[in-house]
Image (spheres, rainbow, N blue to C red):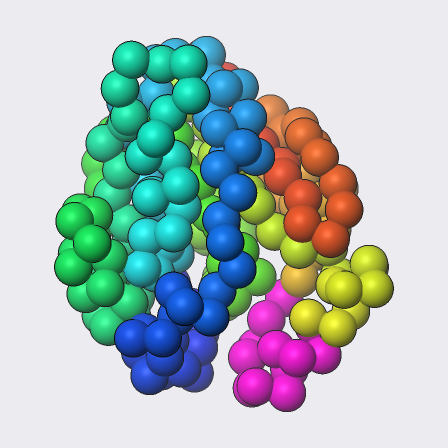
Amino acid sequence: MHGPGDVDFFDRVARLYDRLAPATDPEPLWAGLARADRPVERVLDLAGGTGRAARAIAAPVGIARAPETVVVDASRAMLARAVDRGTPAVQGDAGRLPFRDASADAVVVLDALHHLPEQGAALAEAARVLRPGGVFVVREFDPRTLRGRALVAAEGAVGFDSTFRGPDAWATALDDAGLVPRVLDRGFAFTVVGKKRESQ
């Protein structure tokens, strides 16, 4: 899911990751899932690490039950932490997802898309596994903001080979992947959603 150096780093910090990572606000994720034109019963948490996004959406607002959520990541150590917390997990590459076509109602990626070395392939794979009317929810950081510039510098200092984009650039990338994009919110952290057309 991440570049090789990124995977090694996350393997090393897996035990501490959830203590160091910022708290996850579930509202933007639920706002993105609400854009689906179908019931959201199965969600893939792409590059999901320890399952922060999966756990955030596990307490649904306004629906009868939480969706089944599966974490997909390249880091074995991070996935082990997800499993320890009771979250189903699968080791896999974002550019070659180990799932059938049209097998998920939603794909979410929380604070991780910038780590993926083959972003175009990851978006294409997310589109492939989505069912018609399903959504791809991206929660990312804007490198043009003051905090975003600081984050870009910090990740570079750690040795990550991250590629950050702003919300409009991600919307264009989702459109290129065949999804109908919409920017839901902006700021240092922003949310962009791509919906799979019913005819796809």
Does 77 appear above or below 188? Answer: below
Q: Report x, y in % for residue 160.
A: 55, 79
Q: Is residue 172 visible?
A: no
Please tell me how many numbered marks the rendered image carries.
Answer: 0
Residue 190 at what x, y percent from top left?
67, 44
User: What is the x, y in percent for residue 70?
Assistant: 25, 43
Q: Which quadrant would the N terminus be assigned to in this image?
A: bottom left
Eyeballing the image, is 51 above or below 25? below
The vertical placement of 24 against 16, above or below, is above
Q: Residue at x 78, y 69 (%)?
A: 149
> Going by the image, does 148 lie left or right of 198?
right
Q: Nearer the viewer, residue 108 or 196?
A: 108
Instruction: Name the residue rendered at 61%, 51% in the picture.
Output: 140
- Is 157 magenta? The answer is yes
For the C terminus, the image quarter is top left
Q: Is residue 91 left or right of residue 194?
A: left
164 inside magenta stretch:
no
Residue visible at 57% across and 86% down in the picture:
158
The residue drawn where x is 38% and y is 35% is 57
The residue nearer to you, when weighing 38 against 188, is: 188
Which quadrant of the view contains residue 104?
A: top left
The magenta segment is 152-163
Residue 180 in sight in this render: yes
Classify residue 38 by image quadrant.
top left
In the rendering, at what x and y percent does residue 144 appear? Answer: 82, 59
Q: Is residue 197 above or below residue 13?
A: above
